[in-house]
Image (cartoon, grey):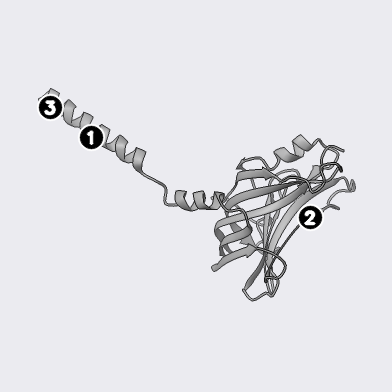
Amino acid sequence: MKKRTLVIFGLVSVISLSCKKESVSPNNDEIEQFLNQTEIQFNGTVLGNGISWVFENWNTKIGFNYGSAWGFVADTTIQNRSCQIFDTEEIENICLLKIISPAFCIDSSYIFKKSIFEIGKKQFNSSTSSIYEGFVIEASSKIESYSTYFGNQENSSFEIIKTQELTPSDPEQNNSKKLKLWIVFSCNLYTDSGQKTGEIKDGKFIGVIEVEPDL
């Protein structure tokens, strides 16, 4: 009787392990397809609005740009990097999505600056954290702006799943280098008064940021 019980238990264990091995997350295929995309784009649900934007060129209604910002401390060499995709005609209720990096010193090494955008899970910046910590996600409608910065991001996620260094337009010059990022995220959005307005769900963003080489 004991042997029969052990055999049955062993079969159940094998079946259980086989099922676990063959099970596939429902998002795996979607993420695999996303990793194979190359166009600048954003797909996701923002405050209940389904968004599917692809930037091809400036002849379409979808625009894209990247830049830097400073002024949060007296030292102007402390900057951050951002990239944003937007609906130039503001046809949709949500018309812009922007991702802002942690601050860093532009005099730091290129290796250090590039490490900020390495593959992996990242934290969110907030009003209680240092400017050198975490990313901020912003979204805008025709009448309001929203941000992850002003509220709790418990159960939210932000992950860079692929990074590609783009070839400089002129390798002979000391040009800024550009990194293409594949990012997946879900987060809570708040007004600047701290009122939660909703969420971004299943966001998938391919964008480009600019990082200086060693100065």
SS of the residue under disc 2: strand
Quick one: 63 or 169, which is closer to the camera?
A: 169
The residue that appears at 61% across and 65% down in the rendered structure is 53
Q: Position of residue 184 (x, y in %)?
A: 57, 51
The residue lying at 89 percent from left, 48 percent from top is 76
Q: Name the side, left or right, on which 37 lies relative to 21.
A: right
Quick check: 196 left or right of 165? left
Please name the amino acid that badge 1 sits on.
Val
> Of label 2 and label 1, which has the lower sequence position?
1
Q: Which numbered disc covers residue 67?
A: 2
Where residue 4 is drawn, which disc sits there?
A: 3
Indicate the quadrant containing the C terminus: top left, top right, bottom left or bottom right: top right
Q: Residue at x 25, y 36 (%)?
A: 15
On the picture, is 106 further left or further right than 125? Answer: right
Question: Looking at the rendered structure, which numbered label has been put on residue 192?
Answer: none
Mark 2 against mark 1, which lies toward the viewer? Answer: 2
Q: Mark 2 or mark 3, which has the lower sequence index?
A: 3
Residue 157, can we see it?
A: yes
In front of the other: 36 or 103: 36
> Which mark sits nearer the N-terminus, 1 or 3?
3
Is 85 placed above or below 5 here? Answer: below
Identify whether 56 is placed above or below 116: below
The location of residue 24, given as percent across then percent down, is 39, 46
Circle 3 Cα neighbour tier, 10 Å, few/some/many (<14 / 14–19 / ≥20):
few
Considering every residue shown, the one lying at the far top of the view is 3
x and y, in percent, of residue 66 in the image:
75, 56
